[in-house]
Structures are given as structure tokens and as C-alpha cells.
Image: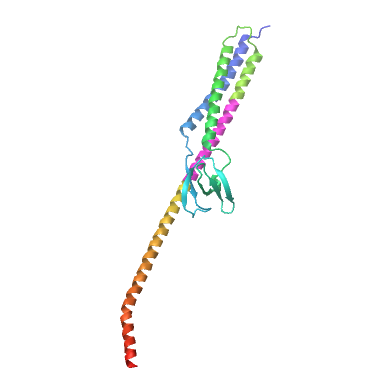
Amino acid sequence: MKIPTIPLLLTALLTVIALVPALAQTQTMDQARSSAYVSDLLDVPLRAGASNRYKIIGAVRSGTAIEILKVDTVKGYTQIRTPTGSKGWLPSAQVTDTPSSREQLAGVRQNLEQLQSRHADLKQHLDEVVGKPGEENLSYPQLYEEALRLRQQLAQYRKVSADTVAIDERNKTLQEQAVVLERELQLVQQENRALRDDNDNLRFLMGAVLLGACLLLAVMMPRIREQRREQWSRL
């Protein structure tokens, strides 16, 4: 017994029409996000001690694998060792157990490409099945199974797209943290310049006091000697 062709074609066409606009909208959103992608490349200052008052001895690029040596929970700093062997302290908030968002985003985009390719193959196969209504192997269960598989692939595609949005939000957060770190670095540099200026002023003042004392002593010595001579002459 053959299945009626017209109802079967209508069912297949309605399924494809329902899937294609949603997929096109998801692809458009992904392309818009790709063009607005913000890189999370930034350098975290590496300090000599567990405070922002210690001098900066280097910098660590975001996403670098590091070795944790010590954690100061009170001051919120972590001592680390870089792959090059450098040791230093950086804010514990900048240390995470997960890979950088760049690596996560690369994996997500690779999964997106695979899903897009798989979706295109399934859609092409469905078009071929719908385009051959007169063959013996055409059946409604087969067509329904293909449509269901397409829906599952589309749901997975949407989930990965949502993950991409979350990673983009993390990129924005990292960018804001980079701005805060840059401002903190500028404040530290200003403090260092102020300390150097204070040291220079103190040295100048001490030199002036020492010079004044020497001049005063040079003026007073002859008078002291003269007074002593007068005292001896009176005796």
C-alpha cells in the first residue's frame, strides 16, 4: 500500500518552512556577533609582593598557564610562577581554573561550523527525499525521522549560539577589568613619581641644612677662638 503523495509533500514542505527561517535568524545573529567580537588580550601586572604598593616586575598575558605557589586570602593575592620561570604576585581575581575565553570561543566556533555542515547535509538529504515522491522507498516515518533529526540539530545549534553570547559577555567583562588594571597601573606610576620627587626634595633639604651648618660653624669658629684667647689673657 502506497502513502498518498500530496499530504506527504505538504507535511515535508511545512517542516522545512518551519526550520529554515529559524536557522537563518540564528546564523544572522552569529554573524553580527562575530563582527563585534572583542579580543580579551591583556597583560596582568606581576608584582614583587602581595599588594599593589609593590613594584611591578613584569606582566602575564591573559590565558597563560601558570603554577600557583602561594595564596594570600587576606590580601587577595596569589604568588605564581610563569612558564618562563618568573615568580611574582597578582590579584587572585585574575586567576581562574578554566581556559581563557579565546580558547573556549575557538572551540565553540568549531562546533558551530560542524553543526552548520551537518545541518546543510541533512537539509539537502531531506530536499532529495521530498523531490522524489514516486519512488518505493519513500515513507512518512522516514520523512518524519529526518525532520525530527533536523529539529534536534537546530536545538543544539541554538544552545551553542547561546554559549557564544555568554563568552562574548565574558570578553566585555575582561575588557572592563583591563581598563581598571590600566588605571591602577597609572596610579602606581604616579605614586612612584611622587615618591621619587619626595626623596629628591628630602635630599636637597638635607644638603641645604648641612651646608648651612658648615657655614655657621665656619663663621663661629674664629669668634670662639678669640673668646678663649681673651679668657686666657685675663688669667
Instruction: Count the numbered circles shown.
Output: 0
Q: Main secondary structure of the magenta part?
A: helix
The quadrant holding residue 152 is: top right
Where is residue 24 drawn, in percent x and y?
A: 52, 24
75 lies above or below 94: below
Q: Quadrant of the N terminus?
A: top right
Where is residue 147 drawn, in percent x and y?
A: 61, 19
Q: Find the magenta span and give its range.
A: 154-178
Residue that lies at the very extreme toward the bottom in this rendered image: 235
Q: Residue at x 54, y 23 (%)?
A: 116
208 lies above or below 20: below
Where is residue 75 drawn, in percent x and y?
A: 56, 53
The quadrant holding residue 231 is: bottom left
Q: Is residue 168 magenta?
A: yes
Where is residue 73 drawn, in percent x and y?
A: 59, 51
Residue that lies at the very extreme toward the right in this rendered image: 1
Q: How is the image coloured?
A: rainbow
32 lies above or below 222: above
Q: Is residue 57 magenta?
A: no
Q: Residue at x 61, y 16 (%)?
A: 11
Q: Nearer the viewer, residue 134 or 216?
A: 216
Q: Residue at x 33, y 93 (%)?
A: 234
Q: Quadrant of the C terminus?
A: bottom left
Q: Residue at x 42, y 59 (%)?
A: 195
Q: Nearer the viewer, residue 195 or 88?
A: 88
